[in-house]
Image (tube, helix red, strand yellow):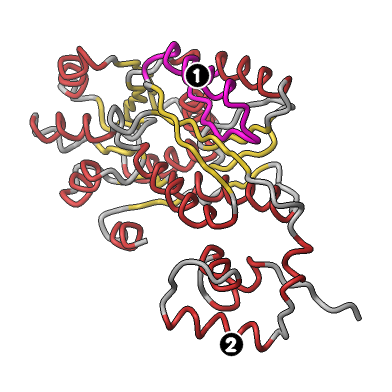
Amino acid sequence: MREKKYTIKDIAALAGVSKGTVDRVLHKRGKVSKKALDAINNVLKEIDYQPNLIARNLKNNKTYHICALIPDPNEDPFWQYAVDGINDAINEFKPLGVFIQIFYFSPDSTESFLVENKKIVELAPDAVLLTPLFYKETLAIIDTYAALNIMVSTFNNQIKSNHVKSFVGQNLCRSGRVAARLMHMIVPETSEILIIHFDEILNNALHMQEKERGFRSYFEALNSNKYKITTYKIKEPDFRKTITGLIDNSKITGVFVTTSKTYKVAKSIQKNNATRIKLIGYDLLDENIGYLKEGIINFLINQNPKGQTYYSLTSLVEYFLFNKEIPNQKLLPIDIVNSENFNSYIEK
């Protein structure tokens, strides 16, 4: 039987530490805690570690450059969780010779998206991680990267392109169906339900379209005329007036928000004492959690943006360093969060 060749990842897993910590111990650079050092040394002794075994798994000593392009979290706080995942990857893989650089674009501006992509193209990195917030523009820029032999991975929103190496995120149509099933459980048998899209241009926002498609497909499969479902696209300047007018309609008993801005609807429901309305949306923003605790928001679907960026970058790094094949997609669980279990997700 051939002797197993242990990688840094293997040793890190056995010792219960990060790959960066193992690298610092093996190459005697940087500080690590005594607990981590003892754990790693115990593993090295147990596997009869030979220094060249890991070296053989590295393709070369090249420094790899990966650019991550995401919406600016100062404009939409949802994306701060994605930044946290990227920063975790930066700290972990920097000792391994991987340079990860973050770029931000305005989530309301296709021009900003294109300008930042142009900056990345000029840097000619080895790979780019991006979220295809703008469908048409993303397809075009992916083709540009492919022509320059720059690898592209996506997260959060899936896009159909032969040039995308991998995708990490959720099945958005399925998450819409999950939201519909939850809504079906908590609204009266005869109900009017609203689907609300905030801010973005719907015909260029595939992620919102997919969620709506899943939500509607669930109710259509019921073969029932008892549910009336209406879609509204609401822009920021007039959302308060529009929302107030909608929830004043006594026939409305349920609202499904396709983005993390569920708290905007919750605020109006609370202000207008429209507590008959059941509300379901996305993501564990502080504002959303507050209304979840108060019972104004009934359910949130956690999309785990931090995990999405971390897993995406980990796959790219392991491909470059260890020649490990990247899966075409990694679909994360569709987590249903309510007032009873949100703490377990926050603690993560």
Task: State which tag comes first along the sequence, 2 or 1.
Answer: 2
**Where, quadrant-wise, is the C terminus in this rendering?**
bottom left
Residue 62 drawn above or below residue 22: above
Residue on which the image places disc 1: 134
For numbered disc 1, what is the local secondary structure? loop
Q: Is residue 120 magenta?
A: yes
For disc 2, the neighbor class at 10 Å (few under 14, some 14 to 19, many from 20) is some
Instruction: Please state the horizontal and vertical placement of residue 200, each as a whole percent of the image.
Output: 38, 18
Q: Nearer the viewer, residue 334 or 323?
A: 323
Residue 149 sits in which quadrant? top right
Which residue lies at the image location 44% right of the left edge and 53% below the top edge?
88
Q: Is residue 132 magenta?
A: yes
Instruction: Please state the horizontal and vertical placement of residue 220, each as a whole percent of the image.
Output: 52, 28
Residue on which the image places disc 2: 42
Q: Amino acid at mark 2?
A: Asn
For numbered disc 2, what is the local secondary structure? helix
Q: CA distance from mark 2 to mark 1?
A: 50 Å
Looking at the rendered image, the disc whose residue lies closer to the viewer, 2 or 1, is 2
Q: Nearer the viewer, residue 89 or 188?
A: 89
Q: Nearer the viewer, residue 100 or 214?
A: 100
Which residue lies at the image location 65% right of the left edge and 88% below the top edge?
45
